[in-house]
């Protein structure tokens, strides 16, 4: 039950980050790295939107219980099995 609540809260937060990127820009200011690498004047807005989409994706993984499998699939090549 806790996973579902955390997932729903994460989806709501991620959706608000995508929808209200202008408010995030005025509240937290510009991200210099994003301005340099993600666009000319809209880099920070794109950064906030991408961060919101990542939040939604991770929240869905947590809700469905798939986050452990995804993390193992990503990091298993770094830690080979010991026989």
Image: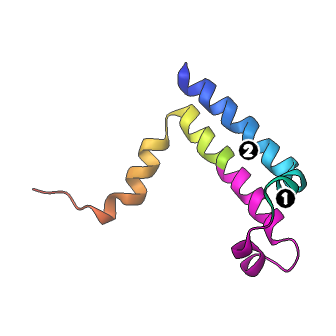
- Give the class, few, some or many, for how many residues have Cα within 10 Å of label 2's Cα (few <14, many ≥20): many
Residue placed furthest toward the left: 83
Secondary structure, magenta segment, majority class = helix
Query: Which residue range is magenta in the image?
Result: 30-54
In this view, the residue in front, 28 or 40, is 28
Residue drawn at (69%, 56%) of the image = 51
Residue drawn at (54%, 22%) of the image = 2
Q: Position of residue 3 (x, y in %)?
A: 54, 27
Which label number is shown at residue 81? none
Q: Secondary structure at mark 1?
A: helix
Residue corresponding to mark 2: 14
- Judged by depth in the image, the label closer to the viewer, 1 or 2, is 1
Q: Is residue 24 magenta?
A: no
Residue drawn at (46%, 49%) of the image = 70
Residue placed furthest toward the top: 1
Examine the rendered structure and indicate whether residue 60 appears above or below residue 34.
Answer: above
Do residues under tags 1 and 2 come within 8 Å of each other at their CB atoms? no
Q: Is residue 38 left or right of residue 6?
A: right
Which label number is shown at residue 25? 1
Q: Work out which quarter of the rendered image holds the C terminus and state it.
A: bottom left
Q: Position of residue 41 (x, y in %)?
A: 88, 76
Q: Position of residue 46 (x, y in %)?
A: 80, 65
- Give the class, few, some or many, for how many residues have Cα within 10 Å of label 1's Cα (few <14, many ≥20): some
Q: Secondary structure at mark 2?
A: helix
Mark closer to the chain start, 1 or 2: 2
């Amino acid at each position: 039950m806790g996973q579902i609540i955390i997932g729903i809260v994460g989806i709501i937060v991620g959706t608000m980050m995508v929808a209200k990127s202008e408010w995030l820009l005025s509240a937290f200011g510009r991200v210099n790295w994003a301005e340099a690498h993600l666009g000319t004047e809209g880099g920070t807005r794109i950064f906030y939107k991408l961060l919101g989409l990542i939040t939604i994706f991770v929240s869905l993984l947590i809700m469905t219980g798939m986050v452990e499998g995804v993390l193992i699939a990503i990091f298993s090549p770094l830690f080979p099995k010991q026989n």
